[in-house]
Amino acid sequence: MKHLLSMCDLPKDDIYAILDMAESFQKGNGWSPPKATFAVNLFFEPSTRTRTSFEVAERKLGLDVVPFETAHSSILKGETLEDTIKTLEAIGVDVVVIRHKEERYYEALKDRVNAKLINAGDGCGQHPTQSLLDLYTIRQEFGGFSGLNITIIGDLSHSRVAKSNSEALSALGANVFYSGPREWFFGDAENYIDIDHAMEISDVVMLLRIQHERHENTSRLTAEEYHELYGLTLKREKRMKKGSIIMHPGPVNRDVEIAGRLVECNRSRIFRQMQNGVYTRMAVLRKILEK
């Protein structure tokens, strides 16, 4: 596996191998790269969880992390992303983690650079490491995926998390449903369900943030209206199946997509997802660095 760019390109065997490696790291087992290895994180969009999670994962594996601030790079002088990566290659960087606002930015790079690329999010496209940490969290809880009912709720059309997870979860045997504003829906109409029905049948309720920065027009709903119509309210949580869990990729807007009191409730796995992000990203780095 030279690059990790999209869940669409990741075979099931590789998914399970990464999840097994993540579990091994969580149990305290170690691994070190066979030689001095340098990583750089290029984030062209704001990030808290993904960026810091990657840096912690890189440092835990003993990688040398090269500081890089895109706001102070030669890209502002007109240098292309490809030339930036080739420059980093020339000075010895082995792994480049990239978040970019352009969807599928990696298509122009993947066959033209020697450094190993990890997609940390491309526009409204894919977010493979978030999907993998979500898969790891679900497998921790249920032991597998076959037959699980998983409903993804919210700003579906703008969510790279929704697209990555729908591909992977379906391939692994889960039943994936969607809910939220119909104008933000993608996919087959038969997989769209009412949010109150979702509460009753779902093993996993996965909520999404409204991505106002990707909307041409702001939402016609206020935060209070959205919460009442499409959010996980205290009342809806009481209708959830016994043993079902709540997930959210973050950042969380409390009392919009989820009631603030539910973020840390017994059903919530939101902060466990963040913790699992480190182990999963360690596994991804190991997978692409191993020969």
Image (spheres, rainbow, N blue to C red):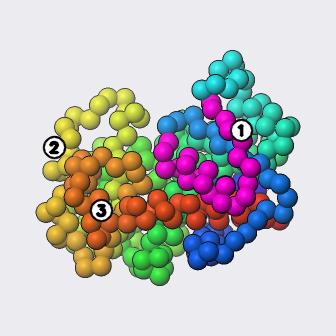
x, y (%) of residue 164? 51, 56
The three-letter code of the residue at mark 2 reads: Glu
User: Quarter-wise, where is residue 30 in the image?
Assistant: bottom right
Q: Which residue does the image show at 64% across and 25% down from the upper left? A: 72
Provide the residue designation for mark 1: 108
Q: Which residue does the image show at 51% across and 70% down from the upper left? A: 136
Q: Residue furthest bottom?
A: 143
x, y (%) of residue 252? 34, 49
Q: Is residue 134 above or below residue 124?
A: below
The three-letter code of the residue at mark 1 reads: Ala
Q: Which residue does the image show at 56% across and 60% down from the upper left? A: 278
The three-letter code of the residue at mark 3 reads: Glu
Provide the residue designation for mark 3: 264
Q: Residue 225: which numbered mark, if any?
A: 2
Task: Indicate the secondary structure of the residue bearing disc 2.
Answer: helix
Sequence-wise, the earlier of marks 3 and 1 is 1
Q: Is residue 82 above or below residue 261?
A: above
Task: Indicate the secondary structure of the residue bearing disc 3.
Answer: loop
Extent of the magenta region:
47-70
The quadrant of the rendering that contains the C terminus is bottom right
- The residues tagged by marks 2 and 1 sit, at their Cα atoms, a distance apart of 42 Å
Sequence-wise, the earlier of marks 3 and 2 is 2
Sequence-wise, the earlier of marks 2 and 1 is 1
